[in-house]
Amino acid sequence: MELTPKRFFITHSSATSEVSDLNAFDRALIKAGIGEQNLVSVSSVIPIDAERVEICEMPMGAVTHCVLAQMRGTEGEMIAAGIAYAFRKDGKGGYVAEGHIHGSAESLRENLAWKMREMSNIRGVEFGEVQFALEELRIPKDMYGCCVAALVFTEYR
């Protein structure tokens, strides 16, 4: 069985919970529009001719492939999660890097840019403009928090 994605969307969010970091994660997924799916993490390749689309509704319980970044934390912490992606200049698809840190979105952006440069170097190909989806959260007192960012595949050929 061959599953080659032809469309994807980008989403990101953050949330807090008084109960647990798992509940903060759940809330963040719901806010990001992917909280009713069965998420399956995949690695980092965007197929040739795959196109970015707007966030779309998917059936409840659908097995949904995504490149997912998440960072959980507790009160007083600054956390960030994000993804970076770019298409090859030769038109042969693209790549995604995910990351998470105890720190700022700006620090994470730098880290993701380094990862993307290394992915380009490893493959010996040039990338077009790198796009970022970053989420940052300073977690309030007596709370748990979570940031998420994802590239979500929606349709297959």
Image (spheres, rainbow, N blue to C red):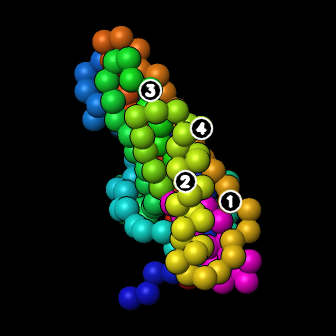
Badge 4 is on which residue?
106
Mark 1 against mark 4, which lies toward the viewer? 4
- Residue 112 tag number: 2
Q: How crowded is mark 1: few (under 14 residues within 10 Å), some or many (20 or more)?
A: some
Disc with the residue nearer the chain's start (4 vs 2): 4
Which sits earlier in the primary sequence, circle 3 or circle 1?
Answer: 3
Q: Which of marks 2 and 1 is nearer the N terminus?
A: 2
Badge 3 or badge 4: first in the primary sequence? 3
Residue 86: where, in percent of width, then height?
65, 65
Q: Is residue 10 above or below residue 46?
A: above
Q: Is the magenta stretch mostly helix, strand or loop?
A: strand
Q: Which residue is drawn at 35% across and 56% down?
A: 38
Q: Pinpoint residue 91: horizontal percent, then vertical percent.
A: 72, 82
- From the image, tell me which residue sits under label 1: 130
Q: Which region of the structure is painted magenta? A: 83-97
In the picture of the structure, the residue carrying the numbered disc 3 is 78
For the residue pair 85 and 148, the one nearer the viewer reads as 85
